[in-house]
Amino acid sequence: MLDTALRIEPAAGCGADVRDIDLARLTPAEAGQLRQALFDHGVLFFRDQTLTPEQHIALAEQIAPIDVNRFFPAAPGYPTIAKVEKTAEQATNIGGGWHTDHSYDVAPALGSVLVARDLPPSGGDTLFADMYAAYVTLDAETKAQISGLRAVHGSDHVFGEKGVYATTDQPELAKGGVETPETVHPVVIKHPGSGKPVLYVNPSFTLRFEGQTREESLPLLMKLYAHAMSMDRVHTLVWQPGMVAIWDNRATWHFAKNDYHGHYRLMHRITLAGCELEAA
Ligand code: OGA
Ligand code: MN
């Protein structure tokens, strides 16, 4: 069979749509092209897919080894698939603030493969922000200011015994007794797949710059966050049944909108293992 190039069309703001591909029957050549497209575009969107949980796992493994998230409940019968769920009765959703998954890990997850399983009648969009573009569009003075800086990331304030989820109606996400030491990453990383510089701090898990208090760090962190949230570098993914998104955690942030109260939403997420990050 001839290897044909994937049909990839850049999406508004961030990421790219991939057309004419069956994720349940990916050839090794297509998997290689998908991985490179993921590194280049940060997030890929797919329509009209019919992935069983087994095919979801096989797809993830064609891209990278699986990294099981230690906080999320698993889909019944599938320990490597995380359940991202909000019931009609719950008020709190998962991922309802700008973040990138696993930045609190020494080797942060490469990305995630998210499959829509049950969608509300409307709402429940996911926003994606482009961190390559966030870095490139910083002014020269700010680039100089963050050059060589490193930042401390942690998860206890989110997933710990006294973290934000503990006092919500998603308390099973707050895990007492799970060892989560803080970790340090460069503020501008060299993307391991593309070699391009990326802004690697995020509002949910970055605590402070190394060698500074949180108070000392906040003015610059807030400036970087405000810049990175600029809507002209954000894509709004409006989910339809059969849609799949694969994102790169080093190149993008994401935000799950919580605007469908009284309705059920279920997504299946497989997290892809990553590597330690180097400065750009
Ligand atoms: C996640 C997440 C977004 C969504 O799975 O990591 O943030 O829209 N989900 O469900
Ligand atoms: Mn997330």
Image (tube, rainbow, N blue to C red):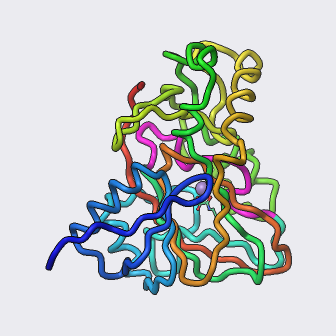
Please, is residue 52 above or below residue 180 in the view?
below
55 falls in the magenta region: no
Magenta residues (range): 92-109
Image quadrant, ligand 1: bottom right
Classify residue 34 by image quadrant: bottom left
Q: Is residue 279 visible?
A: yes
Q: Dividing the image into 4 quarters, which one contains the N terminus? A: bottom left
**Residue 105, percent from left and from top:** 48, 41
What residue sits 67% from the left and 71% below the top?
Answer: 238
**Residue 128, percent from left and from top:** 62, 54
**Residue 30, percent from left and from top:** 27, 68
Q: Is residue 177 visible?
A: no
Q: Dividing the image into 4 quarters, which one contains the C terminus? A: top left
Q: Main secondary structure of the magenta part?
A: loop
**Residue 123, percent from left and from top:** 77, 72
Classify residue 223 by image quadrant: top right
Query: 259 or 155, which lies in front?
Result: 259
What residue sits 37% from the left and 60% below the top?
Answer: 66
101 falls in the magenta region: yes
Please, is residue 133 above or below residue 89 in the view?
above
In the image, 204: left or right of 108? right
Residue found farthest to the left: 1
What residue sits 58% from the left and 81% below the top?
Answer: 117
Number of numbered discs overlaid on the protein picture: 0
Please, is residue 61 above or below residue 55 in the view?
above
